[in-house]
Image (cartoon, rainbow, N blue to C red):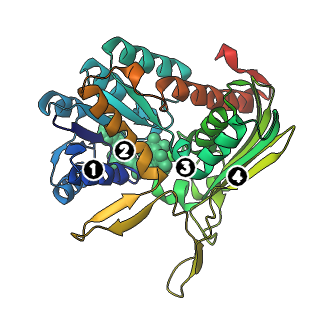
Amino acid sequence: MAPVRIGVVGVGTFGINHLRCFQQMGYMGQAELVAACDVNKELVQQRAQEFGIQAYTDHREMLAKEQLDGITVVTPDPFHHDIVMAAAEAGVHVLCEKPLDVTTEGCREMIQACDQAGVLLMVDFHKRYDEYHLAMREKIQAGDLGQIQYGYAHMEDRIEVPRDWFPGWATKSSPAWFLGVHFYDLACFLLGAKGVRVWATGQKSRLREFGVDTWDSISAKVTFDNGATVAFDTSWIIPEGFEATVNQGIRLVGTLGFLECDSQDRGTRTACTNDQPVQQTHNKSFLRMKKDKQGREIWEGYGIDSIADFALNVNELLAGKSLGDLGPYPSGEDGLEATRIAAGVHQSLETGEIIELAKL
Ligand SMILES: NC(=O)c1ccc[n+]([C@@H]2O[C@H](COP(=O)([O-])OP(=O)(O)OC[C@H]3O[C@@H](n4cnc5c(N)ncnc54)[C@H](O)[C@@H]3O)[C@@H](O)[C@H]2O)c1
């Protein structure tokens, strides 16, 4: 059986990881990276040359010409919807970057279109693949913490992410959409629960000084349907001197105990005179690179595993399995739940009210 033929749509900052993942799966006969698409013609041609694949500037043309089994969508948050819909229309399986969409209506349309077409819809919630978080989940499921009552999570990017990496679409996004959804989904995953209501507050000042008109920070308190309440602090204004691009962690407290995970500092530290910042910590669980015997780069970590899982799932489908046989994966429904919380966070920011999530 020939492995899944894959195209990647959006080959900017994070798209490169999708390309790397499928290229190296090709070394093991697990995937064939066939094409890439980006509206930035120069960029996509450069990537296509580097990876030895076809370049497109229109995803519809790529879908029409390449006989693909699957595509991955790595475009800015507001531009996932139409590409996922086009994949469903073409009968092509799809992995979509988080958030699935920035509206619950959009998520529902995407889920319905993929359901009707009988294609796999996965969302790249990589925190579900982090071995530290999986260990937390096992303990929770074993009942070691008793009934979870409350918790706390934080995810914070250095200021260069919204200011320098994508100032063009940071104004259409926020710490809740870009970062929060990771931990809203992780909380749902760890607790085995869905969000019920949310209250949020936020600030806008620091990024405005750089002409980027969006939220600096958002704090949200979410009550889940198992009774637990989790506070989520998200921001993307931490100083450039901080030791990593991302700072993140979670703690959950139950009737019988608690769990804490520093999801950023995995115990690897460097201090090099030529580096900025001089002292750095490295989350090698997320991404790490090694070379194989042929000297080729092999990327590992949960940031790759979550993408690779899509190709492995499509291979199962091509071999005759049904969607129901695939076992657990971050689904369109999971994408909808995280979007529902983020949409509720923003509604609460606008109105100052507590938002009942069932209404969204
Ligand atoms: N899973 C993760 O850890 C992770 C990390 C960063 C970003 N992301 C997500 O990945 C997505 C992309 O983020 P990024 O940081 O790479 O952004 P980016 O701006 O660096 O790259 C996005 C690319 O998409 C292209 N693009 C825009 N509209 C397009 C269209 N209609 N068709 C084809 N290409 C189009 C842009 O030209 C750009 O090259 C976002 O949804 C973001 O939330 C996920």
First in residue order: circle 3 vs circle 2? 3
Q: Nearer the viewer, residue 162 or 204?
A: 162
Tell me: 281 left or right of 5.
right
Type of amino acid under label 2? Ala
Residue at position x 43%, y 41% in the image: 76
Which residue is farthest bottom?
273
How much space separates mark 3 and mark 4, taking CA atoms?
A: 33 Å
Task: Check disc 2 and report its element: helix, strand or loop.
Answer: helix
Q: Is residue 243 above or below residue 71?
A: below
Residue 109 place in picture, x, y as percent: 44, 16
Say which residue label 4 marks.
Answer: 205
Q: Crowding at label 2, few (<14), some or many (≥20) Cα neighbours within 10 Å?
A: some
Tell me: 70 left or right of 177.
left
Tell me: 294 left or right of 326.
left
Say which residue label 1 marks.
Answer: 25
Q: Is residue 204 visible?
A: no
First in residue order: circle 4 vs circle 1? 1
Task: Check disc 4 and report its element: helix, strand or loop.
Answer: loop
Type of amino acid under label 4? Ser
First in residue order: circle 4 vs circle 2? 4
Quadrant of the frame with the N terminus: top left
How much space separates mark 3 and mark 2, taking CA atoms?
A: 14 Å
Q: Crowding at label 1, few (<14), some or many (≥20) Cα neighbours within 10 Å?
A: some
How much space separates mark 3 and mark 1, taking CA atoms?
A: 20 Å
Quadrant of the rendered structure where residue 310 is?
top left
Q: Crowding at label 3, few (<14), some or many (≥20) Cα neighbours within 10 Å?
A: some
Say which residue label 2 marks.
Answer: 308
First in residue order: circle 3 vs circle 1? 1
Quadrant of the rendered structure where residue 243 is?
bottom right
Type of amino acid under label 3? Asp
Residue 317 place in picture, x, y as percent: 29, 26
Q: Is mark 4 within 8 Å of ligand 1?
A: no
